[in-house]
Image (spheres, rainbow, N blue to C red):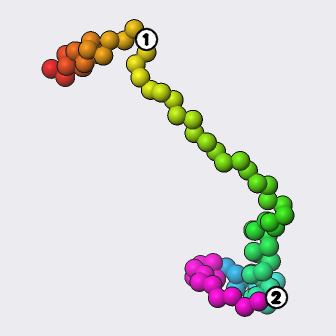
Amino acid sequence: MRITLNIDDDVADSLREQARLLDEPFEQVVNDVLRRGVPPVANMVPTERYRIVPNRSGLAPGVDPLRLNHLNDELLT
């Protein structure tokens, strides 16, 4: 199958160098690298979506918001 890809220059240079060192065609080196880097779909384990459970935020029992604001005002002056 023929597919056109845009490959960064440094990646293409590395693939060409590997093809030269292994004395293999460039296309074969690209395919081998992709096979090593991309797992087959059959081996991929579906994962459950991560869910965030919201927590009701508020002041702890016994904390008076008016006193808290008063303390904040004192710290700022």
**Residue 49 shows in this picture:** yes
Residue 57 position within the rendered picture, expressed as x and y whole percent measured from the top left: 44, 26
Residue 37: give its label. none
Residue 61 position within the rendered picture, expressed as x and y whole percent measured from the top left: 43, 11
Magenta residues, dominant SS class: loop
Q: In which quarter of the image is residue 5?
A: bottom right
Residue 22 position within the rendered picture, expressed as x and y whole percent measured from the top left: 82, 83
In this rendering, would 54 be left or right of 12?
left
Q: Name the residue under label 2.
A: 24
Callout 2 amino acid: Glu
Which segment did they paint magenta? 1-12
In this rendering, would 44 be left or right of 8?
right
Residue 31 position within the rendered picture, expressed as x and y whole percent measured from the top left: 78, 80
> Image quadrant for the N terminus?
bottom right
Are the residues at dot 2 and dot 1 in contact (C-beta closer than 8 Å)? no
Q: Which of marks 2 and 1 is in front?
A: 1
Q: In this view, does 32 lie above or below 41?
A: below
Q: Which residue lies furthest to the right in this view?
A: 42
In this rendering, would 59 be left or right of 44?
left
Callout 1 amino acid: Pro
Q: Which residue is drawn at 51% across and 29% down?
A: 55
Q: Which residue lies furthest to the top in this view?
A: 62
Q: Which residue is drawn at 70% across and 81% down?
A: 15
Q: Name the residue under label 1.
A: 61
Q: Is mark 1 on a helix, strand or loop?
A: loop
Q: Quadrant of residue 68?
A: top left
Question: Dot 2: within a 10 Å radius of its alpha carbon, few (fewer than 14), some, or many (20 or more) residues?
Answer: few
Q: Residue at x 63, y 78 (%)?
A: 11
> Image quadrant for the C terminus?
top left
**Residue 21 shows in this picture:** no
Magenta residue check for 4: yes
